[in-house]
């Protein structure tokens, strides 16, 4: 130790010094810059710490823990909360990232048209109207209030809600039954994925407001419109309604059911999900580092492919039938051998359910991948738990908080 101190501190004070190869290490204090002195001191400290760690290996776990804790503190400044310290180290070894579309790839600013059933509107004295609910609901409400000048309070006062069927991730729809105050008639209203709602309809309104039969020819026209909007990376949502004799009936499970057939199509809307700034660059950086990025979404295959191409997950030259884009039901129906063979090639999985996302993670882990999963809803909890690293994007709820490793506070 004395030789170490002499070499790095005392010996340079004697004047010009050279190393074993004859190269000058020190030119005297008169010619030495302050930066050189500081770097020399830091080198001494680093060498001393290295010697201590090597000589006393019991201190290595403490040093690693302190390093991870410091990283955790730095990440908190970026609104990223770490729940499990070891996940910081695991994240650096990730080979595959499974991300959903909403809140992770896309900026939650949607524009569209329609009428909302579950969002809320409040008038603020300072900034006009404030909209609450999911991004989809806020987009629809803002269009109704700001573009159509609808009085939401008046609309709500003219009818009373009898029953609400919340959005179902498998059926891709939500609905309500409501009674009009003026004539006591009961109506069922549905909104959801356009192709799903279209299957429930037998009639549609034309531009003049007349009700027409939805025959095969007209149905095909609407399907082409839906595909065209999806190919332009628009989320296509349909609205439909019908007047019913009763508010609903009770199914075998004792739950009230809203009529969901023989509906009249009110219209279609397209919601634009702009890609988050920096997402394409982040995807390119991951791919350059050898990390595969897969997008798993509930949207239809045309929308999913358009958005994945826009974000750089898919290349413009890739065809939809080469195995890089699949639907959840297709992936689910593969045999175990087929899934293991094709899972590496899949870049986008559309119309997927939470169980499909979980199945994807399980297959990737069996293939030896270190899998990171991002989620923005409680239905992502199983996949977050199964993954090597789970990242929740501003999710609320105890179920997810018990299963993720990172949480992005600002969504």
Image (cartoon, rainbow, N blue to C red):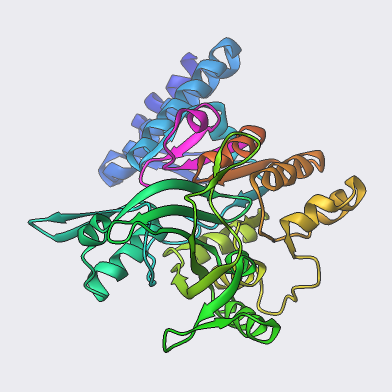
Question: Looking at the image, how many numbered discs can be counted on the residues?
Answer: 0
| Closer to the camera in the image, 100 or 229 | 229
Residue ranking furthest to the bottom: 208
**Horizontal relation, residue 22 to residue 7: left or right:** right
Q: Is residue 398 magenta?
A: yes
Looking at the image, residue 59 lies above or below residue 192 = above
Residue 86, image x and y in percent? 56, 27
Q: Is residue 110 visible?
A: yes
Residue 396, image x and y in percent? 41, 36
Looking at the image, residue 351 lies above or below residue 233 = above
Residue ranking furthest to the left: 125
State the extent of the magenta-drawn residues as a range: 389-411
| Residue depicted at 78% across the width and 60% down the height | 345
Q: Is residue 344 visible?
A: no
| Residue depicted at 59% across the width and 50% down the height | 169
| Residue depicted at 39% across the width and 59% down the height | 185
| Residue depicted at 84% across the width and 52% down the height | 333
**Horizontal relation, residue 233 to residue 76: left or right:** right
**Horizontal relation, residue 163 to residue 312: left or right:** left
Residue 19, image x and y in percent? 53, 39
Residue 354, image x and y in percent? 64, 45
Looking at the image, residue 385 lies above or below residue 148 = above
| Closer to the camera in the image, 170 or 39 | 170
**Horizontal relation, residue 314 to residue 334: left or right:** left
């Amino acid at each position: 130790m004395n030789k170490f101190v002499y070499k790095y501190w005392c010996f340079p004070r004697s004047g010009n010094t050279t190393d074993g190869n004859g190269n000058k290490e020190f030119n005297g204090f008169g010619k030495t810059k302050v930066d050189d002195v500081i770097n020399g001191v830091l080198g001494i400290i680093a060498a001393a710490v290295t010697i201590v760690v090597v000589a006393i290996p019991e201190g290595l776990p403490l040093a690693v823990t302190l390093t991870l804790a410091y990283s955790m503190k730095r990440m908190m400044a970026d609104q990223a909360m770490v729940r499990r310290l070891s996940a910081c180290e695991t994240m650096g070894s990730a080979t595959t990232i499974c991300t959903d579309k909403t809140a992770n790839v896309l900026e939650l600013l949607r524009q569209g048209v329609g009428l909302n059933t579950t969002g809320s509107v409040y008038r603020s004295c300072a900034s006009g109207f404030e909209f609450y609910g999911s991004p989809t609901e806020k987009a629809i409400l803002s269009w109704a209030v700001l573009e159509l000048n609808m009085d939401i309070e008046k609309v709500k006062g003219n009818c009373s809600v009898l029953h609400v069927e919340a959005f179902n991730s498998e059926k891709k729809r939500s609905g309500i039954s409501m009674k009009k105050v003026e004539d006591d008639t009961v109506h069922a209203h549905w909104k959801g994925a356009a192709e799903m709602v279209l299957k429930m309809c037998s009639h549609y309104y034309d531009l003049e407001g007349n009700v027409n039969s939805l025959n095969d020819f007209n149905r095909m026209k609407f399907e082409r419109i839906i595909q065209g909007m999806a190919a332009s990376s628009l989320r296509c949502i349909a609205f439909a309604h019908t007047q019913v004799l009763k508010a609903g009936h009770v199914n075998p499970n004792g739950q009230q059911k809203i009529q969901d057939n023989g509906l009249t199509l009110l219209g279609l809307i397209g919601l634009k999900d702009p890609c988050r700034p920096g997402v394409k660059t982040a995807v390119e950086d991951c791919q350059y580092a050898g990390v595969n990025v897969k997008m798993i979404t509930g949207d239809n295959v045309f929308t999913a492919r358009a958005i994945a191409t826009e974000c750089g997950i898919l290349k413009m030259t890739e065809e939809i039938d080469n195995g890089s884009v699949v639907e959840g039901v297709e992936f689910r129906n593969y045999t175990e051998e087929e899934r293991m063979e094709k899972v590496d090639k899949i870049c986008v999985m559309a119309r997927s359910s939470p169980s499909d996302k979980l199945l994807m993670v399980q297959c990737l882990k069996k293939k030896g991948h270190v899998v990171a999963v991002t989620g923005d809803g409680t239905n992502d909890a199983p996949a977050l738990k199964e993954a090597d690293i789970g990242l929740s994007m501003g999710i609320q709820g105890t179920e997810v908080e018990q299963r993720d490793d990172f949480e992005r506070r600002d969504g």
